[in-house]
Amino acid sequence: MRDMIEDIRPAMLAAMAEIGIAEDVWSGLLAGSTDAAHADVAMPCHTLAQVLRKTPVAISDDIENALGDSLAGLAYISTVNGFLNFTATPGWLTERVTAVVGDERLNVGFEEPRTIVIDYSSPNVAKRMHVGHLRSTVIGDALARMLAHKGHEVIGENHIGDWGTPFGMLIEHYLDFEELEVDDIDLSSFYKGARAKFDRDSEFAERSRNRVVKLQSRDQDTMILWRKLVNISLVHFNEVYELLGVLLTDDDLAGESKYEELLSSVVDRLEEAGMLDESDGAAVVFAEGWVNREGEPLPLIIKKADGGFNYATTDLACIIDRVEVIGSTEFLYVVGAEQAQHFAMVFEVAREAGFMDDSIAAIHVPFGMVLGTDGKKLASRGGQAISLKDLLEEAIRRAEAAILEKNPELPESELRTVAEMIGVGAVKYADLSTERTKNYVFDWNRMLSFEGNTAPYLQYAHARICSIFRRANLDRESARNASISLNHPNERSLARAIIGFAEALDDAIDSHSPHRLATYLHGLAQSFASFYESCPVLIAEDEATRVSRLALCDGVARVLENGLGLLGIDVPERM
Ligand code: ARG
Protein backbone atom coordinates (compact mmCIF):
# COMPACT_ATOMS: atom_id res chain seq x y z
CA MET A 1 0.00 0.00 0.00
CA ARG A 2 2.84 2.36 -0.71
CA ASP A 3 0.64 4.41 -3.09
CA MET A 4 -1.70 5.08 -0.26
CA ILE A 5 1.08 6.00 2.15
CA GLU A 6 2.25 8.49 -0.43
CA ASP A 7 -1.23 9.98 -0.76
CA ILE A 8 -1.72 10.21 3.00
CA ARG A 9 1.64 11.82 3.62
CA PRO A 10 0.81 15.51 2.88
CA ALA A 11 -2.09 15.53 5.35
CA MET A 12 0.06 13.74 7.89
CA LEU A 13 2.85 16.26 7.48
CA ALA A 14 0.48 19.09 8.30
CA ALA A 15 -1.15 17.30 11.23
CA MET A 16 2.11 16.20 12.77
CA ALA A 17 3.61 19.68 12.39
CA GLU A 18 0.62 21.00 14.27
CA ILE A 19 1.19 18.56 17.13
CA GLY A 20 4.91 19.18 16.99
CA ILE A 21 6.30 15.78 16.03
CA ALA A 22 9.27 15.94 13.68
CA GLU A 23 8.94 14.14 10.37
CA ASP A 24 11.93 11.85 10.86
CA VAL A 25 10.38 10.64 14.12
CA TRP A 26 7.10 9.44 12.64
CA SER A 27 7.79 8.98 8.94
CA GLY A 28 9.11 5.43 9.17
CA LEU A 29 6.21 4.31 11.34
CA LEU A 30 3.61 4.62 8.61
CA ALA A 31 3.38 1.19 7.03
CA GLY A 32 1.12 -1.06 5.01
CA SER A 33 -1.06 -3.17 7.29
CA THR A 34 -0.84 -6.93 7.09
CA ASP A 35 -4.53 -7.27 7.78
CA ALA A 36 -6.71 -5.42 5.28
CA ALA A 37 -9.82 -6.18 7.34
CA HIS A 38 -8.40 -3.79 9.95
CA ALA A 39 -6.71 -1.17 7.85
CA ASP A 40 -4.73 -0.61 4.68
CA VAL A 41 -2.12 1.54 6.35
CA ALA A 42 -1.40 1.80 10.03
CA MET A 43 0.83 3.76 12.33
CA PRO A 44 1.68 2.42 15.79
CA CYS A 45 2.09 5.30 18.20
CA HIS A 46 3.91 3.32 20.88
CA THR A 47 7.42 4.52 20.12
CA LEU A 48 6.16 8.11 20.09
CA ALA A 49 4.94 7.69 23.66
CA GLN A 50 8.41 8.00 25.12
CA VAL A 51 9.23 11.12 23.14
CA LEU A 52 5.97 12.89 23.91
CA ARG A 53 5.42 11.53 27.44
CA LYS A 54 1.83 10.65 26.65
CA THR A 55 0.06 7.32 26.23
CA PRO A 56 -0.08 5.84 22.71
CA VAL A 57 -3.87 6.02 22.91
CA ALA A 58 -3.79 9.74 23.65
CA ILE A 59 -1.30 10.36 20.88
CA SER A 60 -3.29 8.49 18.25
CA ASP A 61 -6.38 10.46 19.30
CA ASP A 62 -4.45 13.73 19.03
CA ILE A 63 -3.31 12.87 15.53
CA GLU A 64 -6.80 11.83 14.51
CA ASN A 65 -8.13 15.19 15.73
CA ALA A 66 -5.37 17.11 14.02
CA LEU A 67 -6.06 15.30 10.76
CA GLY A 68 -9.70 16.40 10.98
CA ASP A 69 -11.32 15.77 7.62
CA SER A 70 -8.18 16.44 5.62
CA LEU A 71 -8.24 12.87 4.29
CA ALA A 72 -11.90 12.96 3.28
CA GLY A 73 -12.46 10.93 0.13
CA LEU A 74 -9.07 9.28 0.51
CA ALA A 75 -9.17 7.30 3.73
CA TYR A 76 -11.28 6.56 6.78
CA ILE A 77 -9.38 7.05 10.01
CA SER A 78 -9.82 5.10 13.21
CA THR A 79 -7.78 4.53 16.33
CA VAL A 80 -7.43 1.27 18.21
CA ASN A 81 -5.06 0.60 21.12
CA GLY A 82 -2.63 3.28 20.15
CA PHE A 83 -2.71 2.42 16.47
CA LEU A 84 -3.79 5.01 13.95
CA ASN A 85 -5.55 3.10 11.17
CA PHE A 86 -6.26 4.26 7.65
CA THR A 87 -8.66 2.43 5.37
CA ALA A 88 -8.91 3.39 1.73
CA THR A 89 -12.25 4.74 0.61
CA PRO A 90 -13.96 2.99 -2.30
CA GLY A 91 -13.35 6.21 -4.24
CA TRP A 92 -9.60 6.03 -3.74
CA LEU A 93 -9.53 2.31 -4.53
CA THR A 94 -11.56 2.83 -7.67
CA GLU A 95 -9.30 5.53 -8.92
CA ARG A 96 -6.14 3.51 -8.26
CA VAL A 97 -7.37 0.23 -9.70
CA THR A 98 -8.66 2.02 -12.78
CA ALA A 99 -5.22 3.54 -13.30
CA VAL A 100 -3.48 0.16 -12.87
CA VAL A 101 -5.81 -1.82 -15.13
CA GLY A 102 -5.74 0.92 -17.74
CA ASP A 103 -1.96 0.99 -17.81
CA GLU A 104 -0.14 -1.29 -20.19
CA ARG A 105 2.61 -1.95 -17.62
CA LEU A 106 0.14 -2.31 -14.78
CA ASN A 107 1.83 0.66 -13.11
CA VAL A 108 5.23 -1.01 -12.93
CA GLY A 109 7.70 1.83 -13.23
CA PHE A 110 11.20 1.99 -14.65
CA GLU A 111 14.34 2.50 -12.62
CA GLU A 112 17.44 4.48 -13.49
CA PRO A 113 19.13 1.86 -15.67
CA ARG A 114 22.15 0.01 -14.26
CA THR A 115 24.31 -2.65 -15.86
CA ILE A 116 23.84 -5.76 -13.77
CA VAL A 117 25.72 -9.01 -14.23
CA ILE A 118 23.91 -12.13 -13.10
CA ASP A 119 26.08 -15.20 -12.72
CA TYR A 120 23.75 -18.16 -12.81
CA SER A 121 23.23 -21.78 -13.84
CA SER A 122 26.99 -22.39 -14.23
CA PRO A 123 27.10 -26.19 -14.49
CA ASN A 124 30.29 -28.13 -15.01
CA VAL A 125 31.34 -29.56 -18.36
CA ALA A 126 31.47 -33.33 -18.81
CA LYS A 127 28.84 -33.83 -16.14
CA ARG A 128 25.13 -33.93 -16.61
CA MET A 129 23.06 -31.11 -15.22
CA HIS A 130 21.34 -32.37 -12.15
CA VAL A 131 18.57 -31.11 -9.95
CA GLY A 132 21.08 -28.99 -7.99
CA HIS A 133 21.46 -26.78 -11.07
CA LEU A 134 17.74 -26.26 -11.26
CA ARG A 135 17.67 -23.65 -8.51
CA SER A 136 20.47 -21.47 -9.80
CA THR A 137 19.04 -21.60 -13.31
CA VAL A 138 15.44 -20.71 -12.51
CA ILE A 139 16.16 -18.17 -9.78
CA GLY A 140 18.78 -16.45 -11.94
CA ASP A 141 16.39 -16.44 -14.89
CA ALA A 142 13.61 -14.88 -12.82
CA LEU A 143 15.94 -12.18 -11.47
CA ALA A 144 17.17 -11.47 -14.99
CA ARG A 145 13.61 -11.06 -16.26
CA MET A 146 12.47 -8.89 -13.37
CA LEU A 147 15.47 -6.57 -13.53
CA ALA A 148 15.23 -6.22 -17.30
CA HIS A 149 11.55 -5.37 -16.92
CA LYS A 150 12.52 -2.46 -14.67
CA GLY A 151 14.73 -1.15 -17.45
CA HIS A 152 18.15 -2.43 -16.40
CA GLU A 153 20.74 -3.82 -18.73
CA VAL A 154 21.13 -7.38 -17.57
CA ILE A 155 24.14 -9.42 -18.59
CA GLY A 156 23.69 -13.10 -17.96
CA GLU A 157 26.90 -14.98 -17.33
CA ASN A 158 26.91 -18.72 -17.37
CA HIS A 159 30.13 -19.44 -15.49
CA ILE A 160 30.49 -23.03 -16.62
CA GLY A 161 33.30 -25.14 -15.23
CA ASP A 162 35.19 -25.71 -18.47
CA TRP A 163 38.84 -25.39 -17.46
CA GLY A 164 41.35 -26.71 -15.00
CA THR A 165 43.27 -29.83 -14.10
CA PRO A 166 40.35 -32.29 -14.42
CA PHE A 167 40.37 -31.61 -18.13
CA GLY A 168 43.59 -33.56 -18.51
CA MET A 169 41.89 -36.77 -17.49
CA LEU A 170 38.65 -35.89 -19.25
CA ILE A 171 40.43 -35.43 -22.56
CA GLU A 172 42.42 -38.64 -22.15
CA HIS A 173 39.27 -40.53 -21.19
CA TYR A 174 37.58 -39.08 -24.23
CA LEU A 175 40.45 -40.26 -26.45
CA ASP A 176 40.11 -43.78 -25.07
CA PHE A 177 36.74 -44.00 -26.74
CA GLU A 178 36.71 -44.32 -30.48
CA GLU A 179 34.69 -41.96 -32.64
CA LEU A 180 32.57 -40.63 -29.85
CA GLU A 181 29.42 -38.82 -30.89
CA VAL A 182 27.31 -36.48 -28.83
CA ASP A 183 24.55 -39.00 -28.41
CA ASP A 184 26.84 -41.86 -27.47
CA ILE A 185 28.48 -40.12 -24.62
CA ASP A 186 26.79 -40.76 -21.33
CA LEU A 187 27.58 -37.66 -19.36
CA SER A 188 26.29 -39.07 -16.11
CA SER A 189 29.03 -41.68 -16.01
CA PHE A 190 31.71 -39.95 -18.07
CA TYR A 191 33.29 -37.91 -15.31
CA LYS A 192 33.06 -40.74 -12.81
CA GLY A 193 34.65 -43.10 -15.32
CA ALA A 194 37.57 -40.77 -15.88
CA ARG A 195 38.05 -40.22 -12.16
CA ALA A 196 38.01 -43.96 -11.41
CA LYS A 197 40.49 -44.69 -14.18
CA PHE A 198 42.75 -41.90 -12.91
CA ASP A 199 42.77 -43.41 -9.45
CA ARG A 200 43.50 -47.00 -10.48
CA ASP A 201 45.63 -46.69 -13.62
CA SER A 202 48.96 -44.93 -13.15
CA GLU A 203 49.71 -44.85 -16.87
CA PHE A 204 46.42 -43.03 -17.45
CA ALA A 205 47.17 -40.67 -14.59
CA GLU A 206 50.54 -39.85 -16.13
CA ARG A 207 48.98 -39.23 -19.54
CA SER A 208 46.38 -37.00 -17.91
CA ARG A 209 48.98 -34.87 -16.18
CA ASN A 210 50.87 -34.44 -19.43
CA ARG A 211 47.65 -33.45 -21.08
CA VAL A 212 47.08 -30.72 -18.51
CA VAL A 213 50.46 -29.27 -19.39
CA LYS A 214 49.55 -29.33 -23.07
CA LEU A 215 46.20 -27.72 -22.35
CA GLN A 216 47.85 -24.96 -20.38
CA SER A 217 50.30 -24.27 -23.16
CA ARG A 218 47.39 -24.24 -25.60
CA ASP A 219 48.73 -27.08 -27.71
CA GLN A 220 46.62 -27.03 -30.86
CA ASP A 221 45.50 -30.67 -30.96
CA THR A 222 44.66 -30.53 -27.30
CA MET A 223 42.59 -27.41 -27.76
CA ILE A 224 40.63 -29.12 -30.53
CA LEU A 225 39.86 -32.06 -28.26
CA TRP A 226 38.97 -29.74 -25.39
CA ARG A 227 36.59 -27.77 -27.62
CA LYS A 228 34.85 -30.97 -28.71
CA LEU A 229 34.41 -32.08 -25.16
CA VAL A 230 32.98 -28.72 -24.13
CA ASN A 231 30.64 -28.70 -27.13
CA ILE A 232 29.16 -32.06 -26.22
CA SER A 233 28.19 -30.62 -22.87
CA LEU A 234 26.85 -27.43 -24.40
CA VAL A 235 24.47 -29.41 -26.57
CA HIS A 236 23.18 -31.06 -23.44
CA PHE A 237 22.95 -27.82 -21.41
CA ASN A 238 21.06 -26.16 -24.25
CA GLU A 239 18.54 -28.99 -24.39
CA VAL A 240 17.82 -28.44 -20.73
CA TYR A 241 17.61 -24.65 -21.12
CA GLU A 242 15.21 -25.06 -23.98
CA LEU A 243 12.98 -27.40 -22.00
CA LEU A 244 13.11 -25.04 -19.04
CA GLY A 245 12.41 -22.03 -21.23
CA VAL A 246 15.14 -19.84 -19.74
CA LEU A 247 16.84 -16.89 -21.40
CA LEU A 248 20.39 -18.29 -21.40
CA THR A 249 22.03 -18.82 -24.77
CA ASP A 250 25.58 -19.50 -25.95
CA ASP A 251 26.11 -15.74 -25.99
CA ASP A 252 25.94 -15.77 -22.21
CA LEU A 253 28.73 -18.29 -21.78
CA ALA A 254 31.47 -16.92 -19.59
CA GLY A 255 33.10 -20.10 -18.37
CA GLU A 256 36.25 -20.50 -16.36
CA SER A 257 38.28 -20.78 -19.57
CA LYS A 258 37.36 -17.21 -20.47
CA TYR A 259 39.39 -15.91 -17.54
CA GLU A 260 42.34 -18.20 -17.95
CA GLU A 261 44.59 -15.58 -19.51
CA LEU A 262 43.89 -13.12 -16.72
CA LEU A 263 44.98 -15.52 -13.97
CA SER A 264 48.68 -14.69 -13.94
CA SER A 265 47.91 -10.99 -13.77
CA VAL A 266 45.66 -11.66 -10.77
CA VAL A 267 48.71 -13.14 -9.07
CA ASP A 268 50.87 -10.18 -10.12
CA ARG A 269 48.39 -7.64 -8.87
CA LEU A 270 48.01 -9.39 -5.53
CA GLU A 271 51.78 -9.50 -5.29
CA GLU A 272 52.03 -5.79 -6.04
CA ALA A 273 49.43 -5.08 -3.40
CA GLY A 274 51.68 -6.95 -0.99
CA MET A 275 48.93 -9.42 -0.21
CA LEU A 276 50.49 -12.73 -1.25
CA ASP A 277 51.81 -15.15 1.33
CA GLU A 278 53.21 -18.63 1.10
CA SER A 279 51.63 -21.61 2.76
CA ASP A 280 52.85 -25.20 2.16
CA GLY A 281 54.27 -24.18 -1.18
CA ALA A 282 51.07 -22.51 -2.33
CA ALA A 283 50.59 -18.80 -2.95
CA VAL A 284 47.77 -17.63 -0.71
CA VAL A 285 46.10 -14.53 0.66
CA PHE A 286 45.18 -14.28 4.32
CA ALA A 287 42.12 -12.09 4.19
CA GLU A 288 41.28 -9.84 7.12
CA GLY A 289 39.14 -11.55 9.68
CA TRP A 290 39.04 -15.09 8.30
CA VAL A 291 40.03 -17.86 10.66
CA ASN A 292 39.49 -21.60 10.67
CA ARG A 293 37.96 -23.65 13.49
CA GLU A 294 41.22 -23.64 15.39
CA GLY A 295 41.33 -19.86 15.22
CA GLU A 296 44.24 -19.82 12.78
CA PRO A 297 44.17 -17.45 9.81
CA LEU A 298 42.36 -19.03 6.88
CA PRO A 299 44.12 -18.78 3.53
CA LEU A 300 42.45 -18.16 0.20
CA ILE A 301 44.52 -20.29 -2.16
CA ILE A 302 45.54 -18.40 -5.29
CA LYS A 303 48.15 -20.68 -6.84
CA LYS A 304 48.54 -24.26 -5.73
CA ALA A 305 51.90 -25.85 -4.93
CA ASP A 306 51.78 -27.67 -8.29
CA GLY A 307 51.42 -24.34 -10.10
CA GLY A 308 47.72 -24.76 -10.89
CA PHE A 309 45.28 -21.96 -10.23
CA ASN A 310 42.22 -22.24 -8.07
CA TYR A 311 38.46 -21.69 -8.30
CA ALA A 312 38.94 -18.50 -6.25
CA THR A 313 41.63 -17.17 -8.60
CA THR A 314 39.20 -17.44 -11.49
CA ASP A 315 36.53 -15.63 -9.51
CA LEU A 316 38.98 -12.80 -8.80
CA ALA A 317 39.76 -12.57 -12.51
CA CYS A 318 36.04 -12.56 -13.13
CA ILE A 319 35.60 -9.53 -10.89
CA ILE A 320 38.36 -7.67 -12.71
CA ASP A 321 36.65 -8.44 -16.01
CA ARG A 322 33.24 -7.33 -14.78
CA VAL A 323 34.56 -4.06 -13.39
CA GLU A 324 37.15 -3.15 -15.99
CA VAL A 325 35.86 -4.68 -19.20
CA ILE A 326 32.09 -4.87 -18.78
CA GLY A 327 31.87 -1.75 -16.63
CA SER A 328 29.20 -3.14 -14.38
CA THR A 329 28.61 -1.90 -10.84
CA GLU A 330 26.46 -4.72 -9.60
CA PHE A 331 27.04 -8.48 -9.77
CA LEU A 332 24.73 -11.13 -8.49
CA TYR A 333 26.00 -14.65 -7.95
CA VAL A 334 23.13 -17.10 -7.85
CA VAL A 335 24.98 -19.99 -6.26
CA GLY A 336 24.10 -22.46 -3.48
CA ALA A 337 24.47 -21.43 0.15
CA GLU A 338 27.36 -23.87 0.62
CA GLN A 339 29.60 -21.49 -1.31
CA ALA A 340 28.91 -18.55 1.03
CA GLN A 341 32.39 -18.56 2.52
CA HIS A 342 34.05 -18.78 -0.88
CA PHE A 343 32.27 -15.64 -2.07
CA ALA A 344 32.72 -13.73 1.17
CA MET A 345 36.46 -14.35 1.01
CA VAL A 346 36.78 -13.60 -2.70
CA PHE A 347 34.86 -10.32 -2.30
CA GLU A 348 36.98 -9.35 0.69
CA VAL A 349 40.24 -10.04 -1.15
CA ALA A 350 39.02 -8.23 -4.28
CA ARG A 351 38.21 -5.16 -2.20
CA GLU A 352 41.48 -5.22 -0.30
CA ALA A 353 43.38 -5.58 -3.56
CA GLY A 354 41.49 -2.71 -5.14
CA PHE A 355 39.86 -4.84 -7.86
CA MET A 356 36.57 -3.27 -6.84
CA ASP A 357 35.77 -0.27 -4.70
CA ASP A 358 32.79 0.55 -2.53
CA SER A 359 30.74 1.77 -5.48
CA ILE A 360 30.41 -1.84 -6.54
CA ALA A 361 27.87 -4.23 -5.14
CA ALA A 362 28.98 -7.85 -5.37
CA ILE A 363 26.19 -9.94 -3.94
CA HIS A 364 26.03 -13.66 -3.33
CA VAL A 365 22.40 -14.70 -3.77
CA PRO A 366 22.39 -18.07 -2.00
CA PHE A 367 19.69 -20.70 -2.01
CA GLY A 368 18.85 -23.83 -0.07
CA MET A 369 18.78 -27.45 -1.19
CA VAL A 370 16.18 -29.50 -3.01
CA LEU A 371 15.10 -32.44 -0.86
CA GLY A 372 13.34 -35.66 -1.73
CA THR A 373 10.06 -36.62 -0.03
CA ASP A 374 12.24 -38.58 2.41
CA GLY A 375 13.71 -35.27 3.59
CA LYS A 376 17.17 -36.06 2.26
CA LYS A 377 19.04 -34.14 -0.39
CA LEU A 378 17.48 -35.01 -3.74
CA ALA A 379 20.43 -36.22 -5.70
CA SER A 380 19.93 -39.72 -6.84
CA ARG A 381 17.30 -42.27 -7.52
CA GLY A 382 18.44 -45.84 -6.97
CA GLY A 383 22.05 -44.66 -6.94
CA GLN A 384 21.71 -42.88 -10.30
CA ALA A 385 22.02 -39.10 -10.22
CA ILE A 386 18.69 -37.60 -11.23
CA SER A 387 19.15 -35.77 -14.48
CA LEU A 388 17.36 -32.50 -14.89
CA LYS A 389 16.27 -33.42 -18.39
CA ASP A 390 14.60 -36.65 -17.28
CA LEU A 391 12.96 -34.79 -14.45
CA LEU A 392 11.45 -32.19 -16.75
CA GLU A 393 10.23 -34.80 -19.17
CA GLU A 394 8.57 -36.63 -16.34
CA ALA A 395 6.93 -33.34 -15.26
CA ILE A 396 5.44 -32.91 -18.73
CA ARG A 397 4.12 -36.48 -18.78
CA ARG A 398 2.55 -36.07 -15.38
CA ALA A 399 1.03 -32.72 -16.35
CA GLU A 400 -0.50 -34.31 -19.44
CA ALA A 401 -2.22 -36.93 -17.30
CA ALA A 402 -3.43 -34.30 -14.83
CA ILE A 403 -4.86 -32.11 -17.58
CA LEU A 404 -6.66 -34.97 -19.27
CA GLU A 405 -8.29 -35.82 -15.99
CA LYS A 406 -9.43 -32.27 -15.39
CA ASN A 407 -10.42 -31.38 -18.92
CA PRO A 408 -10.92 -34.41 -21.19
CA GLU A 409 -12.24 -32.04 -23.88
CA LEU A 410 -8.96 -30.23 -24.42
CA PRO A 411 -8.10 -30.61 -28.12
CA GLU A 412 -5.26 -33.04 -28.79
CA SER A 413 -3.41 -30.31 -30.68
CA GLU A 414 -3.13 -28.17 -27.56
CA LEU A 415 -2.39 -30.92 -25.11
CA ARG A 416 1.38 -31.08 -25.55
CA THR A 417 1.92 -27.30 -25.39
CA VAL A 418 -0.31 -26.93 -22.38
CA ALA A 419 1.36 -29.88 -20.66
CA GLU A 420 4.75 -28.27 -21.19
CA MET A 421 3.55 -24.99 -19.72
CA ILE A 422 2.01 -26.70 -16.74
CA GLY A 423 4.60 -29.40 -16.12
CA VAL A 424 7.67 -27.21 -16.47
CA GLY A 425 5.83 -24.32 -14.82
CA ALA A 426 4.99 -26.52 -11.84
CA VAL A 427 8.64 -27.50 -11.33
CA LYS A 428 9.85 -23.91 -11.67
CA TYR A 429 7.11 -22.48 -9.49
CA ALA A 430 7.69 -25.01 -6.71
CA ASP A 431 11.26 -23.78 -6.65
CA LEU A 432 10.57 -20.06 -7.01
CA SER A 433 7.71 -19.93 -4.52
CA THR A 434 9.74 -21.21 -1.59
CA GLU A 435 11.74 -18.76 0.45
CA ARG A 436 15.01 -18.69 -1.43
CA THR A 437 17.39 -19.52 1.39
CA LYS A 438 15.32 -22.45 2.64
CA ASN A 439 15.44 -26.08 1.54
CA TYR A 440 12.31 -27.41 -0.10
CA VAL A 441 10.85 -30.80 -0.73
CA PHE A 442 10.45 -31.87 -4.34
CA ASP A 443 6.98 -33.36 -4.29
CA TRP A 444 5.23 -34.19 -7.57
CA ASN A 445 1.75 -34.36 -6.12
CA ARG A 446 1.98 -31.05 -4.38
CA MET A 447 3.55 -29.09 -7.22
CA LEU A 448 1.12 -30.41 -9.85
CA SER A 449 -1.96 -29.89 -7.72
CA PHE A 450 -4.62 -27.50 -8.96
CA GLU A 451 -5.09 -26.33 -5.38
CA GLY A 452 -2.67 -24.45 -3.16
CA ASN A 453 0.30 -22.25 -3.89
CA THR A 454 1.17 -23.95 -7.18
CA ALA A 455 1.69 -23.01 -10.80
CA PRO A 456 -1.39 -24.96 -12.00
CA TYR A 457 -3.59 -23.07 -9.50
CA LEU A 458 -2.38 -19.71 -10.82
CA GLN A 459 -2.47 -20.83 -14.43
CA TYR A 460 -5.99 -22.11 -13.93
CA ALA A 461 -7.15 -18.76 -12.54
CA HIS A 462 -5.78 -17.15 -15.68
CA ALA A 463 -7.38 -19.72 -18.00
CA ARG A 464 -10.69 -19.25 -16.23
CA ILE A 465 -10.65 -15.55 -16.97
CA CYS A 466 -9.80 -16.24 -20.61
CA SER A 467 -12.80 -18.53 -20.71
CA ILE A 468 -15.03 -15.83 -19.22
CA PHE A 469 -13.94 -13.46 -21.98
CA ARG A 470 -14.63 -16.07 -24.68
CA ARG A 471 -18.26 -15.95 -23.55
CA ALA A 472 -18.46 -12.25 -22.67
CA ASN A 473 -19.00 -10.55 -26.00
CA LEU A 474 -16.55 -7.91 -24.92
CA ASP A 475 -12.94 -7.81 -25.96
CA ARG A 476 -10.22 -7.44 -23.38
CA GLU A 477 -9.12 -4.06 -24.77
CA SER A 478 -12.54 -2.51 -24.21
CA ALA A 479 -12.86 -4.08 -20.78
CA ARG A 480 -9.57 -2.52 -19.75
CA ASN A 481 -10.91 0.98 -20.40
CA ALA A 482 -14.31 0.43 -18.86
CA SER A 483 -15.44 2.35 -15.83
CA ILE A 484 -14.97 0.41 -12.60
CA SER A 485 -17.16 0.57 -9.52
CA LEU A 486 -16.45 -1.31 -6.33
CA ASN A 487 -19.69 -2.04 -4.49
CA HIS A 488 -19.08 -5.48 -3.05
CA PRO A 489 -16.43 -6.08 -0.35
CA ASN A 490 -14.87 -8.80 -2.51
CA GLU A 491 -14.57 -6.38 -5.39
CA ARG A 492 -12.70 -4.05 -3.08
CA SER A 493 -10.39 -6.81 -1.84
CA LEU A 494 -9.68 -7.79 -5.40
CA ALA A 495 -8.93 -4.19 -6.32
CA ARG A 496 -6.48 -3.97 -3.40
CA ALA A 497 -4.76 -7.11 -4.64
CA ILE A 498 -4.46 -5.83 -8.21
CA ILE A 499 -3.02 -2.52 -7.00
CA GLY A 500 -0.30 -4.37 -5.09
CA PHE A 501 1.49 -5.77 -8.13
CA ALA A 502 4.12 -3.08 -8.69
CA GLU A 503 5.04 -2.98 -5.03
CA ALA A 504 5.32 -6.78 -4.74
CA LEU A 505 7.56 -6.85 -7.80
CA ASP A 506 9.87 -4.17 -6.40
CA ASP A 507 9.99 -5.97 -3.11
CA ALA A 508 10.99 -9.22 -4.88
CA ILE A 509 13.67 -7.39 -6.84
CA ASP A 510 15.11 -5.47 -3.90
CA SER A 511 15.45 -8.64 -1.86
CA HIS A 512 16.46 -10.80 -4.84
CA SER A 513 13.62 -13.05 -3.77
CA PRO A 514 11.30 -14.22 -6.52
CA HIS A 515 9.18 -16.00 -3.90
CA ARG A 516 7.83 -12.65 -2.76
CA LEU A 517 6.33 -12.12 -6.18
CA ALA A 518 5.01 -15.69 -6.13
CA THR A 519 3.39 -15.18 -2.74
CA TYR A 520 1.72 -12.03 -4.02
CA LEU A 521 0.41 -13.77 -7.16
CA HIS A 522 -1.02 -16.58 -5.09
CA GLY A 523 -2.82 -14.06 -2.89
CA LEU A 524 -4.21 -12.38 -5.99
CA ALA A 525 -5.50 -15.69 -7.38
CA GLN A 526 -7.14 -16.48 -4.05
CA SER A 527 -8.71 -13.08 -3.96
CA PHE A 528 -10.00 -13.65 -7.47
CA ALA A 529 -11.52 -17.00 -6.45
CA SER A 530 -13.46 -15.36 -3.58
CA PHE A 531 -14.58 -12.56 -5.85
CA TYR A 532 -15.76 -14.96 -8.52
CA GLU A 533 -17.72 -16.97 -6.01
CA SER A 534 -19.66 -14.01 -4.67
CA CYS A 535 -19.78 -11.65 -7.63
CA PRO A 536 -21.32 -13.06 -10.80
CA VAL A 537 -19.57 -11.59 -13.80
CA LEU A 538 -21.41 -12.60 -16.97
CA ILE A 539 -24.79 -12.55 -15.28
CA ALA A 540 -24.20 -9.49 -13.11
CA GLU A 541 -27.26 -7.48 -12.03
CA ASP A 542 -26.77 -4.78 -14.66
CA GLU A 543 -24.61 -3.94 -17.64
CA ALA A 544 -22.43 -1.40 -15.80
CA THR A 545 -21.59 -3.95 -13.10
CA ARG A 546 -20.92 -6.64 -15.69
CA VAL A 547 -18.47 -4.43 -17.55
CA SER A 548 -16.83 -3.21 -14.35
CA ARG A 549 -16.29 -6.79 -13.21
CA LEU A 550 -14.90 -7.74 -16.59
CA ALA A 551 -12.40 -4.92 -16.21
CA LEU A 552 -11.29 -6.38 -12.88
CA CYS A 553 -11.03 -9.84 -14.49
CA ASP A 554 -8.88 -8.44 -17.26
CA GLY A 555 -6.62 -6.79 -14.69
CA VAL A 556 -6.20 -10.03 -12.76
CA ALA A 557 -5.44 -12.03 -15.90
CA ARG A 558 -2.82 -9.53 -17.02
CA VAL A 559 -1.15 -9.37 -13.63
CA LEU A 560 -1.03 -13.17 -13.56
CA GLU A 561 0.33 -13.40 -17.07
CA ASN A 562 2.90 -10.67 -16.46
CA GLY A 563 3.87 -11.82 -13.01
CA LEU A 564 4.24 -15.47 -13.96
CA GLY A 565 6.04 -14.36 -17.11
CA LEU A 566 8.59 -12.54 -14.95
CA LEU A 567 9.11 -15.79 -13.10
CA GLY A 568 9.67 -17.47 -16.46
CA ILE A 569 6.36 -19.34 -16.42
CA ASP A 570 3.94 -19.39 -19.35
CA VAL A 571 0.19 -19.30 -19.05
CA PRO A 572 -2.15 -21.21 -21.34
CA GLU A 573 -5.46 -19.68 -22.41
CA ARG A 574 -7.28 -22.90 -21.73
CA MET A 575 -6.39 -25.95 -19.77
N1 ARG B 1 30.57 -24.27 -11.56
C1 ARG B 1 30.38 -23.96 -10.18
C2 ARG B 1 29.77 -25.15 -9.46
O1 ARG B 1 29.17 -25.99 -10.04
C3 ARG B 1 29.48 -22.77 -9.96
C4 ARG B 1 30.05 -21.47 -10.43
C5 ARG B 1 29.36 -20.29 -9.84
N2 ARG B 1 29.86 -19.05 -10.30
C6 ARG B 1 31.04 -18.49 -9.93
N3 ARG B 1 31.41 -17.35 -10.46
N4 ARG B 1 31.82 -19.07 -9.05
O2 ARG B 1 29.86 -25.22 -8.26
Image: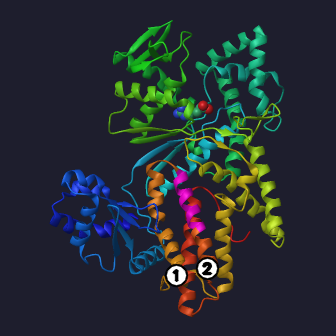
Which secondary structure lies at badge 2? helix
Dominant secondary structure of the residues highlighted in magenta in the image = helix
Q: Quadrant of residue 457?
A: bottom right
- Is 521 inside the magenta-drawn segment? yes
Q: Does residue 352 appear anywhere in the picture?
A: yes
Mark 2 sits near ligand 1, with its Cβ under 8 Å away: no
* Figure check: 361 above or below 49: above
Pointer 1 with pointer 2, Cβ within 8 A = yes
Which secondary structure lies at badge 1? loop
* Figure check: 257 above or below 435: above
Q: Which of the marked residues, 1 or 2, is nearer the chain's N terminus?
A: 1
- Which region is colored magenta? 514-526
76, 174: nearer the viewer? 76
User: Label 1: few (<14), some or many (≥20) within 10 Å?
Assistant: few
Q: Does residue 571 appear anywhere in the picture?
A: no
Instruction: Tell me which residue sits at (28%, 52%) in the image.
Output: 47
Q: Identify the residue under disc 2.
A: 534
Rounded to the nearest whole Å, what is the CA distance between mark 1 and mark 2? 9 Å
- Is 362 inside the magenta-drawn segment? no
Q: Identify the residue under disc 1.
A: 488
Q: From the top left corner, tell me how far across and down residue 22 is, in percent.
A: 18, 57
Name which residue type carries label 1. Answer: His
Q: Position of 168 compared to 498: left or right?
A: right
